[in-house]
Amino acid sequence: MSASSVVLRGIDARTFTEMESFVKDLEARPVERLLRDLPELADLPDTKVSLVSYVISSKYRGSEPAEKQKMRESVAATFEQLGPGQVRERVGAILDRLR
């Protein structure tokens, strides 16, 4: 599976301006696409994962109850599919924020 454009932008973001652009790209993405890319996004460096977590939790807070439930279920399913390691821990931390 090849990385999506938002994942590639996250990998390439080095300057403040590039990080800002990465966040704007995350914010503009439909929730479903962000959640689909979550394992790859959670594999980025810590600072970028923090930005991903912030954007997902912001989208979560702004969602209707049914959408919140779908988001929690999607992140939980991703968490369950991942093997032990840092990416799984990071997805678990994102899941914890969706409460």
Image (spheres, grey):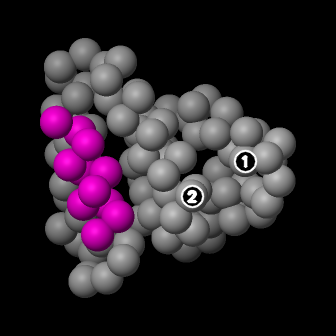
Is most of the magenta stretch helix, strand or loop? helix
Q: Is residue 19 at least partly visible in the picture?
A: yes
How many other residues sit within 10 Å of disc 1, few (<14), some (14-19) or many (≥20)?
some
| Element class at badge 2 | helix
In front here: 27 or 30?
Answer: 27
Give the residue at mark 1.
19
Q: Are marks 2 and 1 in contact (CB under 8 Å)?
A: yes
Q: Is residue 96 left or right of residue 3?
A: left
Q: Is residue 45 left or right of residue 97?
A: right
Q: Is residue 20 above or below residue 49?
A: above
Residue 20, horizontal then vertical, whole percent? 73, 39
Q: Is residue 85 above or below residue 38?
A: below
**Residue at 69% in and 65% down:** 11
Quadrant of the frame with the C terminus: top left
- Identify the image quadrant of residue 86: bottom left
The magenta segment is 89-99
Give the residue at mark 2.
47
Q: Is residue 78 left or right of residue 6?
A: left
Report the number of discs: 2
Instruction: Tell me if residue 87 is in the magenta stretch.
Output: no
**Residue at 76% in and 57% down:** 13
